[in-house]
């Protein structure tokens, strides 16, 4: 593929080692290496792991980095309106998460904190689309009651995982649920929940616990800021009832109609649609489509059609124009509207 040509492309697997266990379901779905310590795949990623220069970046099938191809022809990939509003950033990072152990209690800074303390343009607001979940599986999101910074700091220093877990508000989830997670809100995901995650394009995580995980949180859990500073990015108050109603949504994977997955609270950060073969035309724009059911085809206005099967991930440039899908279903992840 020439650097100057922007066209839809299937993405090879992009799993790599992490500090928690998992990854075999990703390997099976995406023809990747699987586990035991590769619980994430970064799909269509132009984002690197925190503090690294290459690891995390997605490659196209010919070996070129997607980041480099987009930078070589940003208007064709992202569209003029997107560039006018956001620059050449894709504004989104899409992941598969497949944890075989509970994720540690952690949180992410917002844009203002990231700009002031880390000199970055994005924080890490994220959202989880539940693809599979064991019966009774739960996610923790937000504190149950008002916390004090000093009390949280004491729990972190004491490595008191039980008390930190007990402080969280846990909610049961099942396949088809979606949970929007504002930056600053503490959270955790139980083992066995298979997630498609959308987020701002950074790798910014602050750990409140890490015993039993392959990471030294005292050294690497606070973004090199120290916990006294890092804890200033933590929301200490619980989510209000009206906020809880906004962040929880649901789509039906067996539906025959395409639908938006998140409520409007997510619109400033990213968009996701569950697409079916209902002939709904999707407007032109950068996106990443993950096929979850069927053997079908993406039909583009300005590019060759692409045949897809379950597990295929396709990165779509603006230049491909509008498109429809036939005989398959999946999730289209997109940046916020320009």
Image: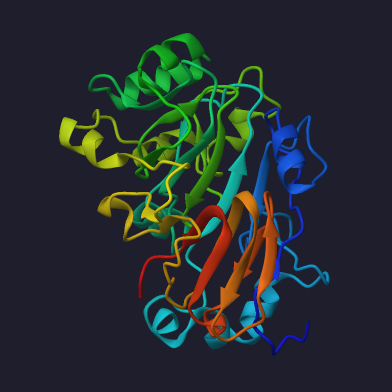
Image quadrant containing the N terminus: bottom right
What's the residue at 27%, 23% (across, down)?
Answer: 148
What's the residue at 83%, 42% (across, down)?
Answer: 33
Q: 96 or 220, which lies in front?
A: 96
Which image quadrant for residue 11?
bottom right
**Where is residue 336 drawn, in percent x and y?**
38, 65
Look at the picture and state if 276 lies above or below 101.
below
As drawn, is 269 to the left or to the right of 16? Answer: left
**Where is residue 8 drawn, in percent x and y?**
65, 74
Image quadrant containing the C terminus: bottom left
**Where is residue 147 drawn, in percent x and y?**
27, 22
Q: 193 or 45, which lies in front?
A: 193
**Where is residue 284 drawn, in percent x and y?**
46, 78
Which image quadrant for residue 24?
top right
Look at the picture and state if 215 lies above or below 55.
above
Look at the picture and state if 179 lies above or below 79.
above
């Amino acid at each position: 593929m020439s650097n100057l040509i922007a066209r839809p492309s299937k993405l090879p697997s992009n799993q790599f080692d992490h500090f928690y266990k998992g990854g075999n379901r990703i390997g099976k779905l995406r023809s990747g290496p699987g586990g035991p310590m590769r619980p994430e795949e970064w799909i269509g990623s132009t984002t690197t792991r925190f503090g690294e220069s290459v690891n995390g970046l997605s490659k196209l099938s010919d070996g070129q980095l997607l980041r480099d191809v987009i930078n070589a022809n940003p208007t064709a990939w992202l569209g003029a309106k997107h560039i006018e509003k956001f620059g050449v950033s894709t504004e989104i990072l899409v992941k598969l998460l497949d944890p075989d152990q509970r994720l540690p209690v952690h949180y992410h800074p917002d844009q203002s904190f990231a700009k002031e303390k880390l000199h970055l343009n994005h924080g890490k607001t994220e959202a989880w689309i539940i693809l599979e979940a064991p019966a009774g599986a739960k996610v923790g999101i937000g504190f149950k009651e008002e916390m004090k910074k000093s009390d949280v700091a004491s729990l972190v220093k004491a490595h008191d995982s039980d008390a930190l877990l007990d402080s969280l508000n846990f909610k049961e989830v099942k396949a088809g649920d979606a949970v929007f997670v504002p930056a600053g809100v503490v959270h955790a995901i139980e083992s066995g929940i298979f997630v498609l995650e959308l987020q701002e394009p950074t790798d910014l995580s602050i750990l409140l616990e890490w015993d039993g995980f392959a990471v030294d949180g005292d050294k690497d859990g606070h973004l090199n800021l120290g916990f006294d500073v890092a804890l200033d990015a933590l929301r200490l108050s619980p989510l209000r009832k009206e906020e809880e109603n906004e962040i929880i949504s649901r789509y039906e994977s067996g539906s025959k109609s395409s639908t938006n997955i998140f409520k409007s609270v997510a619109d400033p950060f990213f968009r996701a649609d569950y697409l079916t073969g209902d002939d709904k035309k999707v407007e032109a724009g950068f996106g990443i489509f993950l096929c979850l059911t069927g053997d079908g085809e993406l039909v583009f206005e300005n590019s060759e059609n692409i045949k897809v099967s379950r597990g295929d991930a396709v990165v779509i440039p603006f230049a491909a124009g509008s498109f429809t899908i036939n005989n398959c279903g999946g999730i289209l992840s997109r940046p916020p509207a320009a």
